[in-house]
Image (spheres, grey):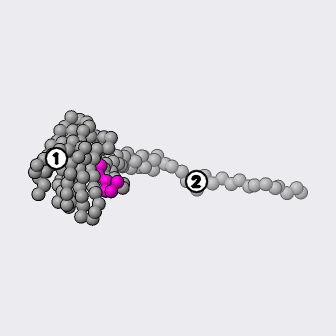
Amino acid sequence: MKEKTGVIMEKRRKHEQGFTLVSTLISLSLVLISLPLIYELLYEVKKISKLEITPYKFMLFIKEDIHRSEQLIAKDNKLYFYLSTDEIAVIEQYGDLIRRRVDNRGHEIYLRNIVKFETDNLDYGVKVRIRLKDGEKYEKVFKVD
């Protein structure tokens, strides 16, 4: 007699695993419930990642720099702070940004969307004016002792 060679196929229909309508509906409902939560999470992350300061906070940074510095000079629409560490910090407009640099190394961005940044020396301090792209104007006089 001749022996059969090859693969023997067995029917296993009773043990087959697959997706049922119930498991598909449950997973679909979980996805639909979590989508708004994921959207809110991404929106908050995007909002936090900008971390822009307001012009009011920018004015507070200038005030803090004045208190930390030994001398302040406003010249060519820039603020020069002579620090006690023999360094010079400069706040200036760079394109549509206002940045702070110390001894011409690196920079820290303080404000964005700036049209104009102006400074004036006064007898008793410094006047700073900012105009944003949306038309808002800010002006502050800093008294220096």
Q: In the displayed orientation, state which residue is furthest to the top.
A: 135
Quarter placement of the C terminus: bottom left
Q: Is residue 85 visible?
A: yes
Circle 1: residue type? Asn
Element at label 1? strand
Residue 37: x, y in percent?
33, 49
For the residue pair 59 and 34, the one nearer the viewer reads as: 59
> Marks 1 and 2, how far apart in space?
84 Å
69, above or below 137, in the image: below
Element at label 2? loop
Residue 32: x, y in percent?
37, 45
Q: Is residue 100 left or right of residue 20?
A: left
Q: Which residues are magenta?
A: 99-104
Q: Is residue 73 left or right of residue 25?
A: left
* Quarter of the figure with residue 6: bottom right
Q: Is residue 36 left or right of residue 28?
A: left
